Amino acid sequence: MPDISIRKTGRAGRITLTRPKALNAMSYDMCLAIEAALDDWATDDDVALVIIDAEGDKAFCAGGDIQQLYDTGRAGDFAYGQTFWRDEYRLNAKIAEYPKPYIAFMQGFTMGGGVGISCHGSHRIVCDSSQIAMPECGIGLVPDVGGSILLANAPGHLGEYLGLTTARMGPEDAIHAGFADCYIPQEKWPGLIETLEQSGNPDDLDPHREAPPHGVLRDRQSEIDAHFNGETLQSILARLEASDSDFAADALKAMRRNSPLSMACAVEMLHRLRGPMADIRRALELEYRFTFRAMENGDFLEGIRAAVIDKDRSPNWQHDLANPPVEAARDMLAPLGENEMTFET
């Protein structure tokens, strides 16, 4: 497959995304190819660990390849998207639960679907150029690919802030938020990967760890918690609107670009996922309830039209932030009955 290289090198199962001109956006076929490889390597005694990386400096993976999702949805075919998301989420769970070390090297943009194939791994490496984000609310989705559980587990109410504002995280911010584990300068990566391939020992990462450049989120944590500690989107908006700080103004500006329905659902999801029974599968089940309905009942098609197809950046969302869609959000997250997410192949 021209978009991805899957092979065994030494003691490592190796996955390299090879479409840098498309920012290594992940297609449905790439998703299935990664899953098949992981299934094979899980019981292969010759494979001690898995390493995933990508060609190019701009992006590890800037998200999913959404053109076909948009085209099929516009044609009234919602089944393609439902199948795509179900199979992608199954892969995300498989990575989170993988029985062998799974090492991801994340340069440049790592967003959406890219988060799903990297940030659930056991060892997540960032560098100076790393920019990690969950931008889904800006296109009428919710933080998905298991990103909702990462956001729910972030310190304080950082998850709400990152999900609702779609803010990007540099290397130190990503480590602080729980999306990455360590910073290693990118120039060290080729030699380090060769070492890992030969040794099959993830402990070889340890001598190369360095202190990352200073980020911004740790310093803003108390301010974030004060403004985003709300039970609903409406209560968070009220806190922000009552503040005269530059932080609040910037957050509101970012949120006003996003789908109110998506943001209302994102807040509800994060609160549900802070319970004692929450894990990657519970997160993916909740996400799938939304994405299953996203084309027919949500803002997804309009969000993609405005951001990617027409690029007018003027989406006509179904709802208004002045009156957040409480009931519609509950409907989007209601059980799917026989269509609930399953993790069977």
Image: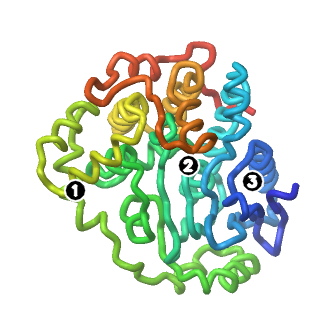
Which residue is nearer to you in this view: 150 or 98? 150
Residue drawn at 23 percent across, 53 percent down: 224
Does residue 93 appear in this view? yes
Mark found first going from the N terminus, 3 or 1: 3
Name the kind of residue labelled 3 in the image: Ala
Specify whether 253 is left or right of 244: right
Element at badge 2? loop
User: Residue 179's spot in the image, x, y percent?
Assistant: 46, 59
Residue drawn at 33 percent across, 45 percent down: 160
Specify whether 123 is left or right of 26: left
Q: Quadrant of the N terminus?
A: bottom right
* Image vertical order of residue 209 relative to residue 21, above or below: below
* CA–CA distance in space, label 3 to label 1: 46 Å
* CA–CA distance in space, label 2 to label 1: 25 Å
Q: Which residue is mark 2?
A: 112
- Which mark's residue is nearer the viewer, 3 or 1? 1
Specify whether 85 is left or right of 10: left
Name the kind of residue labelled 1 in the image: Phe
- Which mark's residue is nearer the viewer, 2 or 1? 1
User: Residue 144's spot in the image, x, y percent?
Assistant: 52, 40
The circle on residue 42 is 3
